[in-house]
Amino acid sequence: MCSIFGIFGLQPGDDPIALRRHALELSQRQRHRGPDWSGVYQDENVVLVHERLAIVDPAGGSQPLLSEDTQLALAVNGEIYNHQHLKAGLAQVYAFQTGSDCEVINALYRQGAPAQWLEQLNGIFAFALWDRQAGRVLIARDPMGVVPLYWGHDAQGRLRVASELKALVDTCADAAQFPPGHCYDSASGTLERYYQPQWRDYDAVQGEAVDLAALRTAFEQAVERQLMSDVPYGVLLSGGLDSSLVAAVAARYARRRIEDGGQSEAWWPRLHSFAIGLEGSPDLAAAAVAADALGTVHHGFEYTFEEGLDVLPEVIRHIETYDVTTIRASTPMFLLARRIKAMGVKMVLSGEGSDEIFGGYLYFHKAPDARQFHEELVRKLDALHTYDCLRANKSMMAWGVEPRVPFLDREFLDVAMRFDAAHKMVGSDAAGGRRVEKGVLRAAFEGCLPESILWRQKEQFSDGVGYGWIDGLKAHAEAQVSDRVLAAADKRFAYNPPQTKEAYYYRHLFEQHFPGPAAAATVPGGKSIACSSPAAIAWDASFAAAADPSGRAIAGVHAQALG
C-alpha cells in the first residue's frame, strides 16, 4: 500500500519544472504511507507522483507503472489479490514490465471498457490511470473504500487526486472523498458506480438460507488470498471473535508461500500477532488466550493514558477526521502500528468489516425485523470508508504498516450478504437461551477457537483497550472545554456542530490542520449509539437519551453496561 498524487489538465503556459516541484512537495505530506521509494511521471498534461510501500515485488514494481509503449502511466495505492487469475484470462497479449500485482490494471485497460473489467478486480485499491495517446484520465476506488482517496480542483481548474486530504486541503477549495465503488472517466466526464451487488436490496436475499460450510470456506479463501506478501507480516489480535478468526485461518496458511500456490515454504513462516491496551485491559487478556491456542508469536503491548493523550493531535492529523468513535479507537491503533513497524513488519491482517456484515454492534439486538436489520447493514457498509476503514488504514499507514481486511474481501462479502438477515438476528434459540450477536459466524467456525473467545461478547476497540481510556478522554475534554464554549459550538462550527465537550475538543484539533468547510464536510455527522447509524436511533426509545458511540451505552445488553 502506498500513496498517489496527481495533477491533470495542465495548460500551455504552466511551468512544468515548478509544477513538478510543487507536486513532490505535496506528495511528501503522504510519504509516511510509502517510505520505500518515490516515483514521478510527467508530460505536457499530467504530473503523477507515487510514494511506495514495497509489499509485492520489492525489488521491482516501482510506480508509476508504464506500458511498454510508455503511453499508459498508472499510480495505484493498494493490492490486487486476484492478479494472477486476471493475467491468465487476458484476451490480448500484454507485455508486463514488472512483477507488481497492480500492473494488471494497465493490461485490463487495453482489453475494453472500464465497466467490463473493474468488476473483476478483487482487492483494495485506489488508482489514477493516464492514457497519453487518448488524453484520458481514469480514476477508481475499491468497492468498500478500504483504501482512501480524495479529489478536487485547484484555482486554475486542474483536477487533483491524492490518497490523503492533507495533500489537497490548501490547494483545492472543493476537496472531497472520492466515493467507493465508483469510477471517473474523463472521456465521458462522468462519475459512475461500477459496484452494484444485488444483495443491497433486501428483497433480493429475503428467504435465502444460510450455508455455514460455504460461509466458512469463503472466509478461509479470503484470508489465504490476502496473505500475498514478499515481506514480513502479522495479524492484529484483540482477542475478539473477528481478529481471532483472521488469526486462526492465517496460522494455517502462514508456513507456505501464497504467490506460488503453496509450493514453497514462506519466507517468514512464523505468524506474529499483536495487541495493545491499558494495563489490565480486556483485549490484552483475551488476546493472550487466543494466541496461546493458535500458536502465534504474540506481542501484547501496554500503553498509558498519558501516552495516548500526548499523541492525540498527531493522530487527528493522520486520520483526518473529528469523529469521536474513530479518534477513540485510532489512538491505540496508532501507537500499536509504531510498535509493529519497529519490529520490521510491513503488513498486518485485521478484523474490520465483520460487524457491518453480521450485525455485531450491540445495538443490533434491538433491530425490529430482518428487513430493518439488513438495511442497517447496508448503511453501515456504505459508511465504512468514513469510519473503520479510514481508522484502520490511516492509523496503521501513519507508520508505513499496511492493514488488510479479509472480511471485506469482495468474494467473501458476496457470500456473507446473500442470505436472509433473519439468520443474523439476535433472539431466543429453541432452548430458550439468548443468542449472542454474530451467532451465524460463530457457528460456522465452531471448534476453531477456545469457547471463551468464540463466544466472547462484542467489545468495540476503544472499549476493549481498557474502559479507562474513554472515561479519561471525557474527563480531559471536560477540563478543556467550558459550558459556555460548548453552548456556542454552532456559531464556530456551522456544519455538523459538536454536541459534547469531547467532540468539541477533537473538532478544534482537526480544524488546526484542516480548515474550511470542504474539509469539515468529509466527516459524517449525526447521533449514534454504540456505532449505530442515525436511522437506527429510532429502534428503541432509550437510544436517543443514551447516545454515545461506546458499546457500554447499550444498557442491559453489554455485560458491563453503565447505569
Image (cartoon, rainbow, N blue to C red):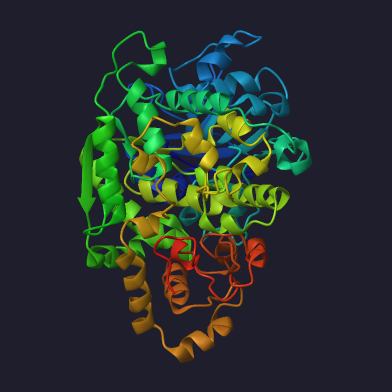
Does residue 302 appear left or right of residue 531 in this picture? Answer: left
**For this rendering, which residue is in front, 228 or 218?**
218
Please indicate whether residue 65 sits to the left or right of residue 52 in the image.
right
Give the vertical position of 43 relative to 366 (above or below): above
- Quadrant containing the N terminus is top left
Of 444 and 342, nearer the camera is 444
The image shows residue 523 at horizontal and vertical percentages of: 56, 61
Q: Total number of numbered labels?
A: 0
Residue 194 falls in image quadrant: top right
Q: Position of residue 184 (x, y in %)?
A: 68, 40
Q: Position of residue 167 (x, y in %)?
A: 47, 53
**Residue 158 in sight:** no
Which residue is drawn at the image coordinates 58% and 49% (left, top)? 428
Left/right placement of residue 399 relative to residue 457 reads left
Tell me the residue at 57%/56% (across/down). Answer: 365
- Residue 397 in view: yes
Taking the view exactly as shown, the residue that stands out farthest to the bottom is: 484
**Side of 113 where 390 appears, left or right:** left
Percent x, y of residue 540 = 63, 67
Which residue appears farthest toward the front when viewing the image?
431
Q: Is residue 523 above or below residue 116?
A: below
Figure check: 279 above or below 59: below
Residue beneath the point at 38% across and 45% down: 240
Q: In the image shown, does 32 or 180 lie closer to the viewer? A: 180
Q: What quarter of the picture does the C terminus occupy? A: bottom left
* Residue 272, quarter of picture: top left
Choose between 384 and 532: the one closer to the eye.
532
